[in-house]
Image: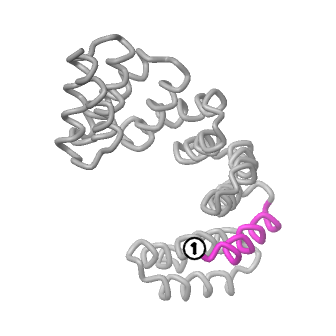
Amino acid sequence: MDKLQKGIEEMQNHNYEEAAKWFTEAIDENPNEPVGYINFGNLLLHMNDFERAQRFFNRAIELDEEAATAYYGLGNVYYEQEKYTKAQEQFILAVHHGLDEADVHFMLGMTYVHQEYPKLALPYLLRAAELAEDDVDIQFQYGLCLAQNGQIDEAEKTMNHVLQLEEEHSDAHYNLGVVALHKEDAHKALEHFDRALEINSEHMLASHAKAQVEQALNE
């Protein structure tokens, strides 16, 4: 097993010091290979050492301007610091340089979500959802974005898919309750709000919505 692989394994096992040792050796042996810098950048990102992570990703890009995963890593550095416009630029570069994985499309979509541009987020979240049909977080955010774009039927279908993946998803139930209200089915909405509260008794949105619906039904 090569040193980079050993470093990645140690990183996955949260042995960050050991991982750093392997990555350092890999870089020392191949100082002109971007992969070592990218892996070290990912490690530093895990440790929230954003400044150094940025330096390593930039070094990888200096060595290879086509290194798509370096742009992706840099995008994550900015994203974690809530610098969404800068993150967006890097994720776009990652896609431009050939990275076509669910994660990069998802992160790109989320940069638009955080800037309250749901229309711009939608195509990226759709692509992520297509590439990762079984990823609960991606499917949920895609469903949410559909709803924000007024695509209620599609949002309902996606939230039901989320529940197939994870039955105890209180937020999916809450959102299906909201969809039911859109369709003027108060009783179905109540069922979903109740289910959301069964799963998470502190779900404030579901609690508030339930109280409002019950009040409306009693009037």
Q: Where is 23 relative to 156, above or below?
A: below
Question: On the picture, is 57 further left or further right than 207?
Answer: right
Q: Where is 90 relative to 191, above or below?
A: below
Q: Which image quarter holds the C terminus? A: top left
- At 71% from the left and 47% from the top, the residue drawn is 88
- At 74% from the left and 80% from the top, the residue drawn is 31
Q: Which one is nearer the viewer's eye here, 85 or 90? A: 85
| Image position, residue 21 (x, y; %) | 55, 88
Q: Which one is nearer the viewer's eye here, 196 or 118? A: 196
The magenta region covers 48-64
| Image position, residue 148 (x, y; %) | 53, 26
Residue 53 sits inside the magenta stretch: yes
Question: On the picture, is 13 further left or further right than 71?
Answer: left
Specify few, some or many for label 1: CA neighbours under 10 Å numbering under 14, 14-19, or 20 or more.
some
Question: On the picture, is 122 further left or further right than 87?
Answer: left
Question: On the picture, is 172 further left or further right than 84?
Answer: left
What amino acid is at disc 1?
Answer: Asn
| Image position, residue 50 (x, y; %) | 65, 72
Residue 72 sits inside the magenta stretch: no
Please name the residue that numbered disc 1 is placed on.
Answer: 48
* Callout count: 1
Q: Which one is nearer the viewer's eye here, 21 or 219? A: 219
Image quadrant where residue 110 sits: top right
Image quadrant where residue 121 sits: top right
In what element is the residue under mark 1?
A: loop
Residue at the limit of the structure toward the left, as seen here: 198
| Image position, residue 86 (x, y; %) | 75, 53
- At 48% from the left and 87% from the top, the residue drawn is 18
